[in-house]
Amino acid sequence: MRGSTLFLLFAIAFVVLNAVFLITQRLPFSEEGVGIIIAAGLTLAVYSFLYKDNPAFKFAEHLYIGVAIGYNMAVDWHANLVPNLIDPLFSPKDEPDYTLVIPMALGILMFSRFVPKLLWLSRWTIAAIVGWGAGVAIPRSITENILEQAKSSFSPVAGPDGFSLANVAAIICLIGVLSVLFYFFFSIEHKGAAGRFSRIGVWFLMVSFGAAFGYTVMARMALLIGRIWFLLADWLKLLKV
Amino acid sequence: MALVKRRIPLALAFCLGVVFAIQYYVPHPVSETVLTRSNLWVIIITSFSIVLGLSSLLHIHIGKMRTLAPGWGYSAVLVASLVTTAALGFVLGKDPGSPVFWIYTTMYVPLSGTMFSILAFFIASAAYKAFRARTLEATILLVAAIVVMLGNVPIGFLMHKYIPVVGNWIYQNPNMAAQRGILLGLSLSFVATSLKIIFGIERAYLGGGD
Amino acid sequence: MSVLTKLLAIDRRIIFLVIAAAVVLSLFFPMRLEVAVTPPVESIYKTIESLPEGSVVLVSNDYDPSSKPELYPMSVALFRHCFKKNLKVVAMTLWVTGEGLIADALNAALKDERFKDKKEGEDYVFLGAKVGGSAVIMGMGQDIAGTFPKDYKKRPVTDLPLMKNLKTLTDFDYVVSIAAGSPGVDDWVIYGSEYLRKKKPKRVELAAGCTGVMATQYYPYLDSGQINGLLGGMKGAAEYESLIQWKDQGTYQMDAESVTHIIIIAFVILGNIAYFTIRKSRGNVTGEAK
């Protein structure tokens, strides 16, 4: 059967099914009901990609990008620019906060990227943000990601009650941390004893990647289960909680 | 011109980088005020930058529409949906009950969820066709993955009550050790790159040209 | 051997159909299997259980609809637990595209009859979304009202009774970051910890919830005590629902997870058996040719 015929048949079946749902009040003939039908249609349009790339999928894909960016901009305006800039500067309760002219000017400067001759102006804003970001990040990353993590790597080998399984685990972890760090240290050739130690690091990394794969499978399946739940419970009303 | 186009931005990055790196260690109220103001300013500037990403996207798609290039219809869908959603949002707001909120729940939520859920199928296909225990390392990866996968689900607990315990032990010990090694390495290189940015050695963020 | 070769060369659309069928059937015929609770999840539960009535919990829900099936049940379960314990909740998000979803999660948690007396502004507040990641967190560390001048419904934050005594992050009793990426848990640990540690005599604890994809990365923070608990993916949500004895989507969907996991494991084992059998037989043929 040709792809276009198959698509047409599915489209007709979808329309007929939803018409029946609306007529029989299985779905309410309201904003909510129409919304569920649109959501189900878009879901099936995206899943049609699993059979073959097709116009329905392309339509859904482009719609997704457009709606995502449009929504992003709308929320950004109402949740960020209005309360943090527009209101305090142009409609304040007390005195206007004139210092906000500086970030407003820096923000507007970024739009100079649209004019090739003035593109260099946007570098001022980017440099300011990048410099600020690097400055605030350095001491905090050192404290939280380096010092705290290094401190935790060196647990006592034996506690007040002597040697226990927890201490064995601590030693295994210490060997793991050091061997993984050593694996990524390329200034020394990984040969002989160094090579063997770096190989231990590879084994720890493989266990970690296997664990990550296991969690990733669960994550991806969760997304699929969520969408199929919506189709069966909210659209077709075949499942009840 | 090189002064305003490159040197001043580099100097700005240097000054701000040094000031805010030192600020962390200065508990004086003035230092705290400087950080408070800068946080607010960064929030405002970041809000402006959201519009920027738009420009190259619109440039590509409006270009396609103008020249009637293959797929221009889809570009029209993108531009129309973007403009409509943004305009409705600016004018009528984004709160529950607004048209934009309806578009969000009816279109954005299902599309977003479905796009990413497709990966579930591909992960199953990849597991069958590509996941091979060809080497010792691949076997270790495979065994760890299987143990952890069983530990993550109720059926593993049903098979044996210690399967979730072993899975959790793998996460909290060998996995934790490897991830800590990666985290330490990444953090060290992040600090090094940040220092290179502050001292003007790393200039990629300025872009090309004069 | 041709059977195994055909099996290995099977059209991937058949694999897709098998997965889809497995999910559909397991949703129709649930096994209602018990979910085993793990210590990282139990730790968050115990912390919230130990908070006195009236304590304030900050929940930073940093995700968007692409992570809804995993993280939305977590948010709802956490809100329900807090409301059950008569704790106050302040919700926020660092992801602009997640704002509508978090408002929905709060409403879903409040639907229950037992919570009909909960008043917005007094028992819970939704601050809305704010871009800036680290800047927002550090801003909250110094001045919450300056960072979030208005809440989700555009009311001045200083006018809300709940927010009157909440000036900085140290005024909270517990902070939970439920995140799908960046900005998220990493930013709360790196930029928020310095403020959370300022509370005396005991620091404000930070907990994390995340998608399965990110979960393995946060075990170093759990081990070092920078986070005191971790909810990992849908499993974490299901475990938490079983602890608060309020089963919802997180739990109901775990049966389908079980079935799909077994199928994936079977695919991996079958694929390897077929591969090595074919390889061995090709090796035998080569040997005979010699």
Image (spheres, rainbow, N blue to C red):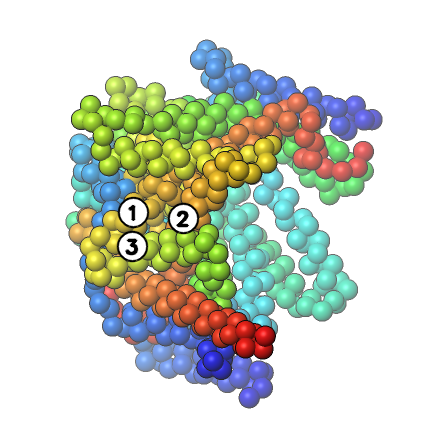
Residue type at mark 2?
Val
Which chain is mark 1 on?
B
Asked whether the beta carbons under mark 3 and mark 1 sit within 8 Å of each other, the answer is yes
Quadrant of the rendered image containing residue A126: top right
Left or right placement of residue C171 versus residue A17 in this view = left
Task: For marks 3 and 1, give the CA distance.
Answer: 7 Å
Which residue reaches farthest bottom?
A1
| Residue at the extreme top of the image, as rendered | B28
Q: Give the Cα distance between marks 3 and 2.
A: 14 Å
* Marks 3,2: beta carbons within 8 A: no
The amino acid type, in three-letter code, at marker 1 is Asn
**Marks 3, 1 in one chain:** yes
The residue mark sitting in front, 1 or 2, is: 2
Badge 1 and badge 2 both on one subunit: no
Per the image, label 1 sits on a secondary structure element best described as helix
Q: What residue does disc 3 label?
A: B151
